[in-house]
Amino acid sequence: MNIKSTFILLLLIQCNQLSSQNIVKGDVKDENSKPIAQAIVYVDGSRIKSNTNNQGEFTLDLPSGQYNLIVRADLLPVDFKL
């Protein structure tokens, strides 16, 4: 295989991997259906994560597969005092 053929093969592999990406969108709400802002949504066992916006919405760009999503949020009241 010459260098040009190798480059084309690698480019095709890269394009195939890019096309197998999936956008996962969702929202995080509390028990009263109010959005939770700045929660962290991450894929269990990886470093892939996203923060929710002020409407509790998040987006993750994942390769095809099955994943467990974990949500972490600090739910301190706004008027919390020490």
Image (cartoon, grey):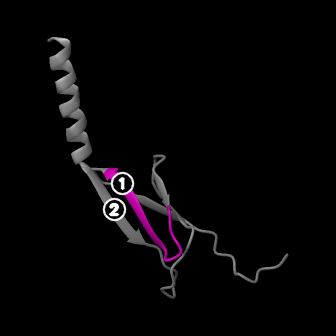
Which quadrant is home to the C terminus? bottom right
State the image coordinates of residue 75 (x, y, percent, origin top left): 64, 75
The residue furthest front is 4
Secondary structure at badge 1 equals strand
Q: Which residue is mark 1?
A: 61
2 versus 61 height, above or below: above
Horizontal relation, residue 7 to residue 63: left or right: left
On whether residue 2 falls in the magenta region, the answer is no
| Residue occupying image coordinates x 46% and y 46% | 46
37 versus 23 height, above or below: below
Who is closer to the viewer here, 4 or 15?
A: 4
Kind of residue sitting beneath label 1? Asp
Q: Which residue is mark 2?
A: 24
Distance from disc 2 to disc 1, alpha carbons, whole Å, reads 6 Å
State the image coordinates of residue 13 (x, y, percent, origin top left): 21, 33
Kind of residue sitting beneath label 2? Val
The residue furthest right is 82
| Residue occupying image coordinates x 17% and y 25% | 8
Residue 10 quadrant: top left
| Residue occupying image coordinates x 71% and y 81% | 78
40 versus 75 height, above or below: above
Span highlighted in magenta in the image: 51-62
Horizontal relation, residue 7 to residue 60: left or right: left
9 versus 15 height, above or below: above
| Residue occupying image coordinates x 31% and y 59% | 23
Asked if disc 2 and disc 1 are in contact, CB closer than 8 Å, the reply is yes
Of callouts 2 and 1, which one flags the residue occurring earlier in the amino acid sequence? 2
Label 1 crowd bin: few (<14), some (14–19), many (20+), radius 10 Å: few
State the image coordinates of residue 27 (x, y, percent, origin top left): 43, 73
